[in-house]
Image (spheres, helix red, strand yellow):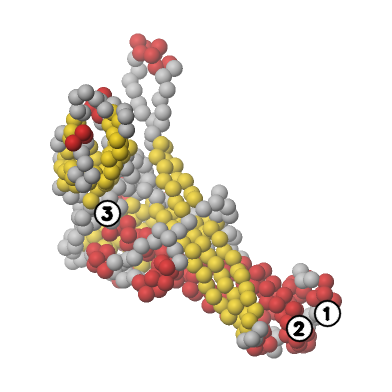
């Protein structure tokens, strides 16, 4: 189970830090390195530590592992989107997100009681898995003279810690910011958020009305606003708002708070500004991506599609971001008289398809939309003695169109013994008369249907067209 790391502040002085390290050090270290009683003792203790390589290594290792790493871990949860992370996973690499649909309802009928008494009614359960997909390393070099300087002033060790932490934390915080921005851009550009049109920028009252209306309907049960098309709600206290920084500057804070029907303090706690939605640090991202799996490039076309995005509302459960591992390792380079430290951070970066997410785009921009038709291609056909297994995939070439497609098990298919897996796998029994049925695909609350398909005629490369049903 994920846990949040408590925020900690480094209030200890250089004297306290040196003495705490000594208390937890080896017997030899304690016997040779004296306790620091006053500031004047610091240089003397420093001479002993600095003059003995084994003591210097032990001191730096304790400094990094006991103090600097604690600050880095704490700082990781103090970034601008701190409350949106789900915590630290100590064990395992995969998180399973399970959603259980609300129960079905039937009318009361005493005559049917005997048939219903022992009938099993299974809940509709859906799940998504999030795998660890982000592994990076931050190198830091501590030179021999850095350690020497640390013992020359009252706050020297604190400054050394600050140097180490700043070098790592600034980079880690920026990269984590990019991760959240990456999730938002990818979800919008692939149509995984419900689109709402706002004004063209000439009258902000129009935008405020759309914000209020959408925020007000999210607490009601609906399958319209999430990628998986499940019945769910997002109460006000779970709504997270992202807004373009310059666009946000045009609004009075009280007006915006009123638009979302929240008091000012609560609204400010749920508002997160984005520098803009149209730029991304692909130079740095390219380096990160080389050490990661499951993360894609942010393309120029995707950034172009974000040009008219003004704001986003997501359920706080939409972000599925976990820290998996934070480890320091070190190497002393004797030929160069310096220590190389490496901070390894592993994360799970994903979003939940079961959580509501709405994107607001200006009316003069290109909004996400449902295409008029979808095209499925037969990828594989596997023949056996009793059945044929067929795999279909959707070719989605429409910009900003939803990509959460589900192949539906219809009543006609069930009668003919055809099994349908929601991601496009069919198992068709062999029969004397070729089985022919229509296929349905659902995208949220929109349905696409094909003409009658004769399964025996399907070959690899065959395409099937599905028309949107009004």
Q: Dividing the picture into quarters, in which one does residue 425 lie? A: top left
Relative to 368, say whether 106 is above or below. Answer: above
Side of 301 relative to 112 (left or right): left
Mark nearer the N terminus (3 vs 1): 1
Residue carrying label 3 = 191
Instruction: Give x and y (percent) for residue 364.
Output: 16, 63
| Mark 3 burial class by Cα count in 10 Å: few <14, some 14-19, many 20+ | many
- Which residue is depicted at the point 35% across and 60% down? 184
Closest to the camera, between mark 2 and mark 3, is: 2
Q: Residue at x 83, y 79 (%)?
A: 32
Tag of residue 354: none
- Dot 2 corresponds to which residue? 52
**Is label 2 in a helix, a strand or a loop?**
loop
Marks 2 and 1, Cα distance to the nearest angstrom? 10 Å
Q: Which mark is residue 32?
A: 1
Answer left or right for 70 relative to 281: right
């Amino acid at each position: 189970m994920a846990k949040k790391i408590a925020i900690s502040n480094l209030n200890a002085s250089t004297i306290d830090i040196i003495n705490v390290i000594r208390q937890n050090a080896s017997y030899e270290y304690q016997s040779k390195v004296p306790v620091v009683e006053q500031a004047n003792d610091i240089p003397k203790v420093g001479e002993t530590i600095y003059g003995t390589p084994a003591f210097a290594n032990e001191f730096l290792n304790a400094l990094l592992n006991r103090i600097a790493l604690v600050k880095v871990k704490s700082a990781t949860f103090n970034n601008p989107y701190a409350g949106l992370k789900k915590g630290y996973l100590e064990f395992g690499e995969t998180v399973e997100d399970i959603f259980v649909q609300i129960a079905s309802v039937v009318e009361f009928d005493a005559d049917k009681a005997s048939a219903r008494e022992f009938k099993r009614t299974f809940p509709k359960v859906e799940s998504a898995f999030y795998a660890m997909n982000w592994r990076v390393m931050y190198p830091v070099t501590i030179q021999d003279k850095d350690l020497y300087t640390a013992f020359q002033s009252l706050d020297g060790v604190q400054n050394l810690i600050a140097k180490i932490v700043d070098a790592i934390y600034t980079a880690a915080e920026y990269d984590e910011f990019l991760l959240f921005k990456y999730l938002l851009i990818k979800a919008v550009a692939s149509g995984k958020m419900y689109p709402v049109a706002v004004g063209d920028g000439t009258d902000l009252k129009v935008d405020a009305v759309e914000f209020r209306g959408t925020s007000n309907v999210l607490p009601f049960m609906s399958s319209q606003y999430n990628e998986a098309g499940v019945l769910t709600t997002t109460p006000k206290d779970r709504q997270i708002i992202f807004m373009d920084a310059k666009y946000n500057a045009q609004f009075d804070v009280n007006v915006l708070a009123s638009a979302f029907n929240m008091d000012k303090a609560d609204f400010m706690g749920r508002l997160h500004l984005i520098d803009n939605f149209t730029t991304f640090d692909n130079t740095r991202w390219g380096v990160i991506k080389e050490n990661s799996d499951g993360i894609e490039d942010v393309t120029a076309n995707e950034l172009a599609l974000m040009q008219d995005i003004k704001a986003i509302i997501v359920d706080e459960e939409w972000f599925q971001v976990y820290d998996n591992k934070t480890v320091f390792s070190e190497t002393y380079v004797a030929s160069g008289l310096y220590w190389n430290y490496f901070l390894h951070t592993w994360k799970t970066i994903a979003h939940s398809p079961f959580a509501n997410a709405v994107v607001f785009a200006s009316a003069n921009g290109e909004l996400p939309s449902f295409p008029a038709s979808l095209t499925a291609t037969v990828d594989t056909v596997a023949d056996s003695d009793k059945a044929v297994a067929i795999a279909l995939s959707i070719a989605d070439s429409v910009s900003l169109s939803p990509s959460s497609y589900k192949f539906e098990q219809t009543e006609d298919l069930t009668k003919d013994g055809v099994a349908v897996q929601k991601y496009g796998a069919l198992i068709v029994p062999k029969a004397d008369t070729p089985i022919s049925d229509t296929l349905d695909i659902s995208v949220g609350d929109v349905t696409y249907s094909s003409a009658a398909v004769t399964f025996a005629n399907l070959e690899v490369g065959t395409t099937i067209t599905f028309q949107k049903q009004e």
